[in-house]
Amino acid sequence: MIYNYFIPLLLLLSYIVYVLGKTRALKFARTGTGGRVLHSLPGYHGIFAAIWCGLPALILYGIWQIIEPGILTSLITRSLPPESHDLSPARLGLIINDIKNAVAGDIIVGVDNVVVREAAHTYLNLQENFRSLISYILLAVICICSFYAYTKIKPALRARNIVETLVRYFLIGCSAIAILTTIGIVFSVLFEAIRFFKIIPVSDFLFGLDWSPQMAIREGQAGSSGAFGAVPVFAGTMLIALIAMMVAIPVGLMSAIYLSEYAAGNFRTIAKPLLEILAGIPTVVYGFFAALVVAPMIRDSGEVFGLNVASESALAAGVVMGVMIIPFVSSLSDDVIHAVPQTLRDSSYALGATKYETIRSVIIPAALPGIVGGVLLAVSRAIGETMIVVMAAGLSANLTANPFEAVTTVTVQIVTLLVGDQEFDSPKTLAAFALGLVLFVFTLILNFISLRVVRRYREQYE
């Protein structure tokens, strides 16, 4: 029972120890010459005691969470009937999985149900016994460590130094986790992509003009070889992203200039949050809007002018995506333009420049790094968008520059390749990782260019 509620109980005990530690420190402060008798504030002493109460027990609890499945599996394997020990590792693994499913309450179908049920019962008993033992050990650790920390609280204790050191190590750990996670993601994609390129040559993938990744289930079926030329997929991505940015950049940048330089304060206070609401609308809503309103409207308008417009077109997806991205460009640009020092504006006006000349020659160059950052963030959002493309642009990998035709994007193809039960040694599935790797390299180059632009035009003000 205690084990299941260990984390809430640990938080409660840590708070109690914090209060006790702080009270003890205040007691020393009152009996001495005011608060100066303590090296650190009483709150640091409370945090010091709470850390000693919670951290060792939390580490022990985490270690047990990691090793518990392995220990229980080893013990339950030994408790199986002797004839089970002669089974192949694969067959034995299936029995262990059945036991764990029975423990979880799932329905087991098979001839070894009696053995599995008995093993599951044994598993539950072992698990309960171990958890009871661990609960007592954790409570003992909490009591011993809390008592130790309580007795260590004295006027000369450098509690602030200890607490700040632990906080610094905690922040370093968080940063390391973020970096290692990124490295892990990159290498996982890289290794799977290498497996794909061992089957499909890199040149065929990067320069091929046909994309049809469907593989035949049985030998001799038509189209069994598939086609993995990624040029149509990346061309569709670029086409939709280009249309989206042609909508988002002018509208977003102009609205940012108006809100920052021309609009009254009351109007800006109301208009900016309303504009940012666009960023909070779910992409599926944009997808419905594109599929049910914008795409039919574009198709009907094209028919009026004698143009052949597909029901699902790159133009419809790009326009709606551009509307979705406007707040990214507008809000970020407005913030950086608003942050330009007023002294620059006043100096420009003092030299006789008009408001337009001041904006063009002073404010925009000063805010250019921030504007570039906002635009590149919007480009990344446009490249990674999936839902709108699925609903408004279709799934056809057409190599075309005509915005009135249906196209597809990289992210949409990655989703379609990984939907459902897939064999992860098939070129069809591995192609998703190759697409992801190329997309990662492209966004990396984009970020590198943005850093070069920011460094080239950065201006610092006091």
Image (cartoon, rainbow, N blue to C red):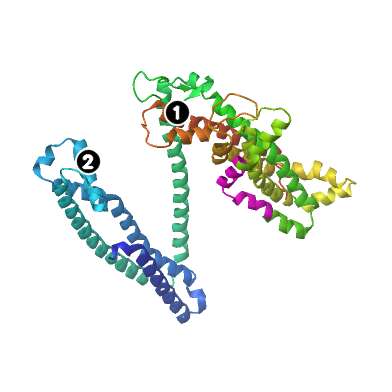
Distance Cα–Cα, label 1 vs label 2? 30 Å
Give residue 335's position: percent from left, percent from top: 69, 51
Give residue 155's position: percent from left, percent from top: 44, 72
Give residue 345's position: percent from left, percent from top: 81, 50
Q: In this orientation, does residue 154 appear?
A: no
- Mark 1 crowd level (few <14, some 14–19, many ≥20, 10 Å Cα): many
Q: Which residues are magenta?
A: 274-291
Residue 60 drawn in magenta: no
Question: Which mark, by number, is residue 301?
Answer: none
Q: Describe residue 332's horizontal placement relative to residue 105 as left or right.
A: right
Q: In this orientation, does residue 122 appear?
A: yes
Circle 1 sits on which residue?
431
Circle 2 sits on which residue?
94
User: Do the residues bearing badges 1 and 2 touch, measured as CB atoms within 8 Å?
Assistant: no
Residue at left offset 45%, top offset 26%: 213
The correct choice, above or below, for 189 with respect to 343 in the image is above
Q: Describe residue 261's horizontal placement relative to residue 452 as left or right.
A: right
The correct choice, above or below, for 45 with respect to 233 in the image is below
Label 2's element? helix
Q: Main secondary structure of the magenta part?
A: helix
In depth, the one of 335 and 18 nearer the eye is 335
The residue most toward the left is: 82
Amino acid type for the residue under numbered disc 1: Ala
